[in-house]
Image: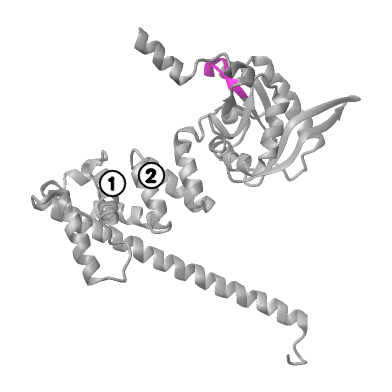
């Protein structure tokens, strides 16, 4: 190494050089993926148009796959199933655009005569969709368009995948847990306790219900058992909570008026820039719970929160609730909080298993009846 180049200078320069190379790799990967998704879009379009215009039906896919493999033996993605996915991919988004209540699109002559027309509005909508789908891998796209009910749900999962950099397994888990239907559905008082746009962001941060199927508990169990299991599976718990949650502590201690209080779980949310108090109740919601959570939030704001933090938010997780009851309980609370249910897997105790009929016994009973 040149004596005029110090180790420190070299290390700093090397970090910059590595960053430049990684950035180039990401761009190259994105370009390759974008080209691949674009190819599947055009492939699906050609297949969909031909099947619509002819009387061949789906049986053409087997022959097309065979002929393309013979012509391009080293090329992947030409199986019958993948050609079918390409067609489904194109039709899912394109037909969703046509079916949406966009009267201007349907009024254009080329669209009425030909559902594969090229009206300006359609092409703009297609461009917006392709901009999203081209940012995620093909396997992710298959999961989304094959599992989503409509284009709105698909766009939700596309956006979440891009923002959170989900792997395919994580995406599959989120779709299976029906995240689209749960996101932002908690009953809260954010609209009158938080300023815009913070209230909207906080609302979308919460879910209802929360799915804790990664833990199993045997009845009877108390809140502390649930709390302990959530902390033991903190990685999966954080995934279910969503992006931005950072774990601060369990049974977080606060001393108020020479009395000890303990918060079940305390988090900090990096996007909301505030502390999040989570209280667990293994019972149905009752209004008194909101009062206790309001008390904890006042304490955290006074004793823990820093000057540059936003006011703390509370989440009460309970086994069951009636929304109208929750709305009344939160209506006059001055601290931002939300109430959600949680679902988990419960195990039947061994001493009860022996008293339950077996499958064979049930079948014999049915035969005899």
Do the numbered discs 1 and 2 sit on residues whose CB atoms are within 8 Å? yes
Q: Quadrant of residue 21?
A: bottom right
Determine the secondary structure under disc 1: helix
Q: Position of residue 152 (x, y in %)?
A: 37, 41
Q: Position of residue 357 (x, y in %)?
A: 50, 15
Q: Which residue is mark 2?
A: 154
Q: Position of residue 101 (x, y in %)?
A: 26, 38
Q: Residue at x 19, y 55 (%)?
A: 61
Q: Is residue 353 magenta?
A: no
**First in sequence: mark 1 vs mark 2:** 1
Q: Quadrant of the C terminus?
A: top left
> For the view shown, which residue lies furthest in the left direction?
55
Q: Which residue is mark 1?
A: 92
Magenta stretch bounds: 318-326
The front one of 293 and 215 is: 215
Q: Residue at x 28, y 53 (%)?
A: 81
Residue 211 falls left or right of residue 69: right
Q: In whole angstroms, how far apart are the C-alphas of marks 1 and 2?
A: 10 Å
Vertical comparison of 29 with 293: above or below: below
Determine the secondary structure under disc 2: helix
Residue 355 falls left or right of residue 279: left
Q: Quadrant of the N terminus?
A: bottom right
């Amino acid at each position: 190494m040149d004596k005029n180049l110090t180790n420190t200078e070299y290390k700093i320069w090397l970090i910059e050089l590595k960053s430049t190379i990684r950035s180039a790799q990401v761009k190259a990967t994105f370009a390759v993926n974008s080209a691949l998704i674009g190819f599947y879009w055009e492939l699906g379009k050609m297949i969909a148009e031909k099947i619509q215009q002819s009387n061949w039906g789906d049986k053409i896919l087997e022959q097309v796959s065979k002929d393309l493999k013979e012509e391009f033996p080293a090329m992947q993605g030409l199986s019958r199933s993948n050609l079918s996915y390409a067609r489904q991919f194109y039709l899912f988004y394109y037909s969703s655009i046509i079916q949406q209540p966009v009267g201007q699109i349907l009024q254009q002559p080329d669209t009425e005569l030909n559902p594969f027309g090229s009206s300006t509005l359609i092409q703009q909508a297609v461009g917006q969709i392709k901009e999203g789908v081209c940012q995620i891998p093909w396997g992710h796209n298959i999961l989304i368009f094959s599992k989503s009910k409509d284009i709105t749900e698909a766009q939700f999962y596309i956006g979440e995948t891009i923002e959170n950099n989900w792997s395919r397994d994580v995406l599959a888990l989120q779709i299976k847990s029906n995240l689209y239907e749960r996101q932002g559905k908690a009953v809260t008082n954010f609209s009158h306790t938080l300023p815009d746009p913070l209230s909207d962001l906080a609302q979308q941060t919460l879910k209802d219900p929360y799915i804790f199927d990664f833990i199993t508990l045997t009845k009877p169990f108390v809140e502390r058992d649930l709390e302990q299991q959530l902390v033991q599976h903190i990685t999966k718990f954080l995934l279910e909570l969503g992006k931005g949650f950072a774990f601060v502590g369990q049974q977080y201690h606060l001393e108020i008026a020479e009395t000890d209080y303990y918060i079940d779980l305390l988090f900090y949310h990096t996007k909301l820039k505030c502390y999040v108090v989570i209280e667990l109740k293994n019972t149905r919601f009752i209004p008194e719970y909101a009062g206790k959570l309001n008390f904890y939030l006042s304490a955290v704001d006074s004793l823990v929160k820093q000057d540059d933090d936003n006011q703390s938010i509370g989440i009460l997780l309970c086994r069951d609730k009636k929304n109208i009851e929750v709305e009344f309980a939160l209506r006059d609370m001055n601290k931002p909080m939300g109430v959600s249910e949680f679902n988990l897997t419960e195990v039947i105790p061994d001493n009860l298993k022996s008293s339950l009929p077996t499958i064979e016994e049930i079948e014999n009973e049915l035969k005899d009846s």
